[in-house]
């Protein structure tokens, strides 16, 4: 279209130059036509240049996400007698990330999740906002953030896309003790203290539990009671290739948010180590809660702890095998044997680096109750 307009303009100009005998009114009319065509051409050129400029630069808004489908086949025995069989298939999570750069120094991160495929009154699933915060660059080494964010603790709480970890289900220690996935609202600072040494510190909303139920105490920032806030700090070392060492501490003055007669100060300590050497990898994590002034907390809930160790081997670039032993106790403060143990052995196959197919055999034991079976799943990230 632009070439046609240019041809018309050139033709008109040539006509003007070769016909000096045209009447004045004819010359004026032709000149107006030429100017109109020139204006149209300029507008079209400006629009095209603007579109090309916008398309050639980095986008200020990005979309990503992940999802995972699980099949669980578990048989329960109590005292050697089969007491239950469970065969379930569940699209466990469908997640979308929406991120936007307002400038080189200010950006938005957000995460919207649908759990268990369907939500609504009487349905098994729910829609959750797990992240929605603004991040500000203070300088090249330090950032600040405010809003709703994942608590900086553990291995999978901040990074839990299916292709990034072994096993169909997330490990039960971080699920029950930490408790992942765990997000709060507040403000925080992150950065680098020295080469290889990073830190995170955050003041944020806290748990709300009158019984010491940690996972049940997550308020998910939905009209959350904020009588008592929590402070979380983490130090992480990644100065050795393939290794990560981290220590997180959190304190909340009153776990019950003022609902109990006594204040229930709660302290969380978590530490973990990750080591990867070629195709071999090892992960180990320990986490514990200490709740003071526990009355009227449930018996034994004043102490809760758990650990796991996982070894993995990538047989080839797209296939890996693993074994993980988990042990945790949500009522470690009493004399009753309430420890739970679970072993998972399985494999991951990555047909693409962002797509994974998983399978593992699971064995669980608590007292005289045993659960045995297998899990299969498929997941992705983008």
Image (spheres, rainbow, N blue to C red):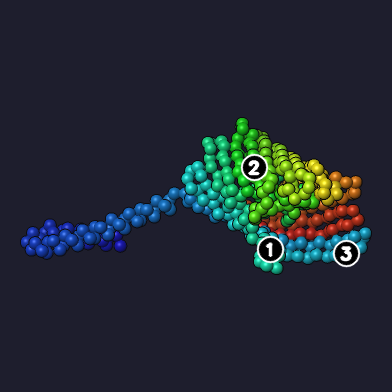
Q: Which residue is mark 1?
A: 125
- 216 shown above or below 311: below
Closer-to-camera residue (156/205):
205
Q: Which mark, by number, is residue 331?
A: none
| Picture quadrant of residue 263 | top right
Of mark 2 and mark 1, the one earlier in the sequence is 1
Of mark 3 and mark 2, the one earlier in the sequence is 3
Residue 12 seen anywhere in this rendered image of the structure: no
Question: Picture coordinates of residue 269 (x, y %)?
Answer: 75, 40
Residue 333 seen anywhere in this rendered image of the structure: yes
Crowdedness of circle 1 by 10 Å Cα count: few (<14), some, many (20+)? Answer: some
Q: Quadrant of the C terminus?
A: bottom right
Q: Which residue is mark 2?
A: 203
Tell which tag, 3 or 1, sits nearer the viewer.
Answer: 1
| Residue visible at 57% across and 41% down in the picture | 144
- Secondary structure category for the residue under label 1: loop
Tell which tag, 3 or 2, sits nearer the viewer.
Answer: 2
Question: Picture coordinates of residue 7 (x, y %)?
Answer: 23, 60
| Residue visible at 74% across and 57% down in the picture | 359
Position of 90 with respect to 37 (left or right) is: right
The residue most toward the top is 194
Q: Which residue is mark 3?
A: 83
Closer-to-camera residue (42/2):
42
């Amino acid at each position: 279209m632009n070439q046609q307009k240019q041809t018309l303009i050139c033709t008109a100009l040539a006509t003007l130059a070769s016909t000096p005998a045209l009447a004045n009114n004819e010359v004026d009319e032709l000149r107006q036509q030429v100017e109109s065509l020139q204006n149209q051409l300029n507008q079209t050129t400006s629009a095209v240049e603007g579109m090309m400029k916008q398309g050639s630069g980095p986008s200020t808004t990005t979309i990503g996400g992940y999802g995972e489908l699980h099949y669980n086949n578990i048989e329960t025995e109590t005292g050697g007698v089969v007491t239950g069989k469970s065969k379930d298939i569940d699209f466990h999570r469908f997640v979308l990330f929406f991120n936007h750069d307002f400038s080189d120094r200010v950006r938005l991160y957000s995460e919207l999740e649908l759990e268990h495929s369907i939500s609504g009154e009487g349905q098994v699933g729910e829609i959750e906002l797990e992240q929605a915060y603004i991040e500000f660059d203070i300088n090249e080494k330090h950032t600040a953030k405010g809003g709703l964010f994942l608590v900086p603790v553990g291995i999978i709480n901040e990074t839990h896309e299916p292709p990034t970890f072994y096993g169909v289900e997330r490990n039960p220690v971080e699920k029950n003790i930490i408790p992942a996935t765990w997000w709060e609202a507040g403000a925080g600072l992150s950065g680098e203290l020295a080469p290889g040494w990073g830190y995170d510190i955050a003041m944020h909303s806290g748990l709300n539990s009158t019984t010491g139920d940690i996972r049940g105490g997550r308020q998910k920032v939905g009209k959350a009671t904020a009588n008592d806030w929590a402070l979380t700090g983490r130090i992480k070392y990644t100065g050795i290739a393939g290794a990560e060492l981290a220590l997180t501490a959190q304190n909340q003055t009153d776990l019950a948010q003022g609902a109990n007669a006594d204040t229930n100060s709660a302290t969380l300590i978590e530490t973990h180590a990750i080591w990867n050497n070629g195709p071999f990898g090892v992960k180990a994590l320990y986490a514990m809660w200490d709740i003071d002034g526990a009355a009227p907390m449930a018996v034994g809930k004043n102490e809760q702890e758990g650990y796991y160790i996982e070894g993995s081997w990538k047989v080839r670039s797209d296939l890996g095998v693993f074994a993980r032993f988990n042990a945790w106790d949500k009522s470690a403060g009493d004399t009753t044997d309430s420890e739970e143990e679970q072993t998972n052995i399985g494999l991951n196959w990555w047909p693409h680096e962002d797509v994974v197919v998983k399978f593992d055999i699971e064995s669980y034991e608590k007292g005289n109750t045993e659960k045995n079976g297998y899990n299969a799943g498929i997941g992705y990230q983008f």
